[in-house]
Amino acid sequence: MVEEEGRIIAVAEDHLWLQTTQKSSCDSCRGRNVCGQRLLQNLNESHGLLKVPLDGRAQRDFKLQDRVSIGIEESTLVRASAIAYLIPLLMLIVLAYVGQQLGGEGLSILGAVLGLLLGSLWGRYRLAAADCQSRYQPRLLQ
């Protein structure tokens, strides 16, 4: 399970809004105290907002600014990554090849763009489908 810690910024009836900080590999490096890359990473630190379902837990158990642990299964993360990245890339390659076979460079470029667009739209539709939304959401661990 991939785990992360987040800070509660809002509590709703059936979910929490968490703010997480994206970390880089600098946090585990021995040379982090003398490296210029870490300074750049600290300047560009980004924060993500996540909607996490309460899964039947009481709303009153959570307060603003509390820190909670969330997690998602590795297999779920790999599946979502394949849908979001691998499928559009494969469609780009296949339609570029088809375009090349049908009419040369111009159709190959058009096929590549069309493949990327169609693959991205399909992935977006698939990940947004009602049956998938709960599967790809992080869960409260504590």
Image (cartoon, rainbow, N blue to C red):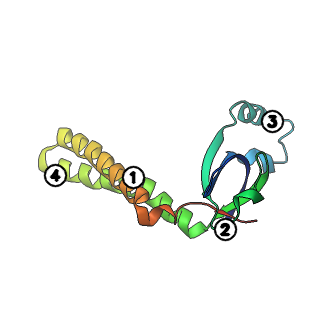
One can see residue 23 in this view: no
Q: Residues within 10 Å of mark 2 (few under 14, many from 20)?
A: few
- Disc 3/disc 1 C-alpha distance (Å): 38 Å
- Disc 4/disc 3 C-alpha distance (Å): 50 Å
* The disc label shown at residue 101, or none: 4
Please, what secondary structure does the residue beneath circle 1 have? Answer: helix
The residue carrying mark 2 is: 1
Front position among marks 1 and 4: 1
Front position among marks 4 and 2: 2
x, y percentage for residue 113? Answer: 28, 42
Q: Amino acid at mark 2?
A: Met
Instruction: Identify the image quadrant of residue 13.
Output: bottom right
x, y percentage for residue 56? Answer: 64, 68
Q: Residues within 10 Å of mark 4 (few under 14, many from 20)?
A: few
| Quadrant of the frame with the N terminus | bottom right
Which mark is first along the chain, 3 or 4?
Answer: 3
* The disc label shown at residue 35, or none: 3
Q: Amino acid at mark 3?
A: Cys
Residue at (69% x, 60% y) in the render: 70
The reply to whether dot 4 and dot 2 touch (C-beta < 8 Å) is no
Mark count: 4
Which mark is first along the chain, 1 or 3?
Answer: 3
Residue 37, placed above or below residue 126: above
Which mark is first along the chain, 3 or 2?
Answer: 2
The residue carrying mark 1 is: 124
- Disc 2/disc 1 C-alpha distance (Å): 24 Å
Which mark is first along the chain, 1 or 2?
Answer: 2
